[in-house]
Amino acid sequence: MSTNVMTPRADATASTSKRGRINMNVVLIEGRALIALVLIVIIFSLLSPNFLGIDNLLVMTRHVAMNAILAIGMLLVVLNGGIDLSVGSTVGLSGVVAGSLLEGLEIPSFNMFVYPAVWVVIVISLAVGLLVGYINGVLIARFRVAPFIATLGMLYIARGAALLITDGTPFSKLRGTPELGNTGFLEFLKSSPLGLPMPVWAMIVFAVIFSLVLNKTAFGRWLYATGGNEKAAELSGVPVKKVQTRVYVLSGLCAAAVGLLLTADLSSATPAAGEFFELNAIAAAVIGGAALSGGRGTIRGTLIGAFVIGFLVDGLVLVGVSQFWQQIIKGAVIIIAVALDQFQQSMQKRSSMKSIAQPASPPVPTLPADASEPVAETTGRR
């Protein structure tokens, strides 16, 4: 009597092959941002010989860096399962505050103007971003206002405050006066240490710091936990409300830093600065693999997503594509990225459900003791 028996070795080989196919699919989907970036570089380098020129790369990287810093702050919020629509307005407000301080702060009570030093201007402008983020965080964590509503309201408040400060006109006298001790703002933020523009250095610093925060600190573990399952995290002792507040504070800090860099780059502080920046930041985080439902995303992926957006837009400009078509193409890229993200999540859910529903291995059948033929070893024991 002969019996066809699936041995443990053969079963393990088939299982390993199946897992290998699934892992390859996951790798291809999770690496979509890097694949897209490589394709963009190849296509535009073929369409324009100047695309990979040193000067053009420096200009593109400067533009990318500002969006990348915003996207890093947005990633923290998205990891928590939230959204921050106020970052673009915070960019404009912090830049306007810096411009007003550099042009002189009037104190009507004493009939005088105060001209703070540049480091004071930078600190106050960053503090404005922290304040906006803290208000967002308190509204969301303490008063349970939906993140979309809270940050949408703050978008209008911050933009309105910027318009009130400037009365609708930009500040352009940012170089300061040596006699007043307020010079150096443009010289510092527009400098290029070691050949790299200051926004690029700022992007590197923010990326390194927040990578360490997410991967090496308790706050990073709490953030991923609250984004994955807020109720379970709270039951495990995670200070959920503090985490929610802090991510919006950090997002406001990133926005304020971009406001300073953009003001120096434009040599002017205008209340309209930063319009629609929040959309580019969200797009960079999503293209980089962050899940809008929270709990999944990396700094590395977000940086790649920012480069995808930046190189795509600058490449389209370089080859002469209409601005209207640029908007359409960028929107299509965002939709594709979100669709791939949803496909990835559904694939992972199906894989998890199959592993849960898979029945246990049936018991090894036994033959009577007086069987005339030997029994094949099927348990894997030797």
Image: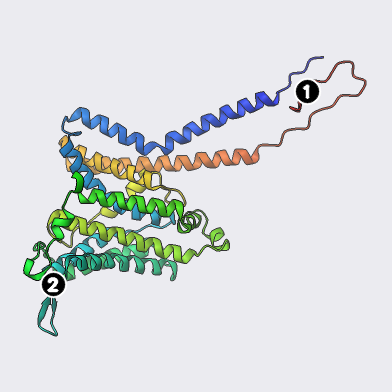
**Looking at the figure, which quarter contains the N terminus?**
top right
Write down the quadrant of residue 320 in the picture: top left
What residue is at 43 percent from the left and 39 percent from the top?
30
127 relative position to 78: left or right: left
Q: Quadrant of residue 114?
A: bottom left
Distance in Å between CA atoms under marks 2 and 1:
89 Å
Residue 285: image x %, image y %? Answer: 36, 48
User: Residue beneath label 2, please?
Assistant: 115
Front position among marks 2 and 1: 2
Furthest-top residue in view?
A: 1
Disc 2, SS: loop
Q: Residue furthest right?
A: 370
Between residue 110 and residue 281, name the one nearer to us: 110
- Where residue 311 sits: x, y (%)? 24, 40
Q: Amino acid at mark 2?
A: Tyr
Amino acid type at image mark 1: Glu
Q: Is residue 43 left or right of residue 219?
A: left
Q: Viewed as shown, does residue 344 lie left or right of 169?
A: right
The residue positioned 52% from the left and 29% from the top of the image is 21
**In the figure, 368 relative to 31: above or below?**
above
Is 146 rendered above or below residue 286?
A: below
The first of marks 2 and 1 along the sequence is 2
* Quarter of the figure that contains the C terminus: top right
| Residue 95 visible to the viewer | yes
Residue 293 appears anywhere in the view: no
Residue count near mark 2 (Cα–Cα under 10 Å), binned few <14, some 14–19, many ≥20: some
Instruction: Give percent across and percent down for residue 63.
Output: 22, 47
Q: Nearer the viewer, residue 342 or 140?
A: 140
**How is colour applied across the structure in the image?**
rainbow
The residue to which callout 1 is attached is 377
Q: How many marks?
A: 2
Q: Residue 243 got which mark? A: none
